[in-house]
Amino acid sequence: MRLDRQVTMGMVRPLRALARPARAATIPILMYHSISDDLDERRGPYYRTVTSPARFRRHMETLRRRGYRALTLADAARELAGPQRADAAPAVAVTFDDGYDDFRTAAFPVMRDLGIAATVFVSTGFLGKPFLDGRPCLGAADVEALAAQGVEFGSHTVTHPQLHDVPATRRREELSRSRETIAALVGGSVPSFCYPFRFPSEDPAFTASLVEELSVCGYHQGVTTTIGVARPGDPGYLLCRVPVNDCDDDAFFEAKLDGHYDWLRLPQSARKQLRAIFGI
């Protein structure tokens, strides 16, 4: 039994359909990790980060069927920050964390065939090496080649630490060095940053400090693991995302696109607050 799916499909979606809210110019920023048949089935469905190539293709075909404009994260952030067009087709951004090599072999061919833009966040210390979970990562030459084909690359730090728990000097180094490395590979700017691990939104002082550091280092937008579709006026360095994995069948995936999964942000935030107060 998957509680988050039951609540989303059995309660939230029907109630929101009855309310018939006015259409908002929201942009679901999808959060993928590995695209592989080597699924992480030992983890609970909510915590899985691997999506099979077959499921991934169905997701991408759903975006095309529903008429989404697929944007890079940089373009999505600019659209969210700019004037809203009532006649614009719905937009989506498809992002990938950690820079796994299976993006090149399993995800990109599908996205290229369907004309869907991609944003990939790499931890530069793992380029050409196994990631923390042992899965192989893209190499430097792969980043260069994919960037030349239109893939947007962003920073996921150098070593993928929990930035909240490292000294300020190391935090700044993780932000700046990773951006410099990626910029040299892609031959251009690196405007986007992705926070590794759980985002500590329960610490407003840290959040404010991080936003300032991202700005100083030259980033223009950033994404977190906070659940939800992105909305006009959201803080550009702290954009929410919609987590996706192999357990998301067609109906559940579409419910996530439509914002029906956003209810989970409240218990997610409450859990963070309890952890901060009681250490649980």
Image (cartoon, rainbow, N blue to C red):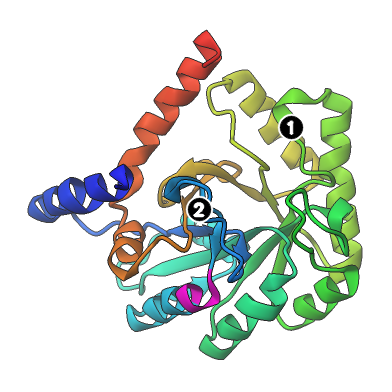
| Residue toward you, 81 or 134 | 134
- Judge left or right: residue 273 versus residue 170: left
- Judge left or right: residue 217 versus residue 69: right
Label 2 – label 1 distance at C-alpha: 26 Å
Say what amino acid the circle numbered 1 marks. Leu
Could you say which quadrant of the image residue 197 lies in? Answer: top right
Q: For the residue carrying disc 1, how many other residues have a C-alpha within 10 Å: few (<14), some (14-19), or many (20+)?
A: many
Q: Position of residue 232 (x, y in %)?
A: 42, 50
The range drawn in magenta is 52-56
Q: Position of residue 273 (x, y in %)?
A: 47, 19
Single out the mark in the foreground, 2 or 1: 1
Q: Residue 163 shows which numbered tag?
A: 1
Q: Residue 272 shows which numbered tag?
A: none
Q: For the residue carrying disc 2, how many other residues have a C-alpha within 10 Å: few (<14), some (14-19), or many (20+)?
A: some
Q: Earlier in the sequence, mark 2 or mark 1?
A: 2
Q: Position of residue 280 (x, y in %)?
A: 51, 16
Residue positioned most to the front: 42
Looking at the rendered structure, the secondary structure element under dot 2 is helix
Q: Position of residue 226 (x, y in %)?
A: 49, 40
**Rendered residue at 58%/65% (across/down):** 75
Could you say which quadrant of the image residue 66 lies in? Answer: bottom left
| Above or below, comparing residue 1 to residue 265 in the picture | below
Q: Which residue is mark 2?
A: 81
- Residue 239 on the magenta span: no
| Residue toward you, 263 or 67 | 263
| Above or below, comparing residue 207 to residue 222 in the picture | above
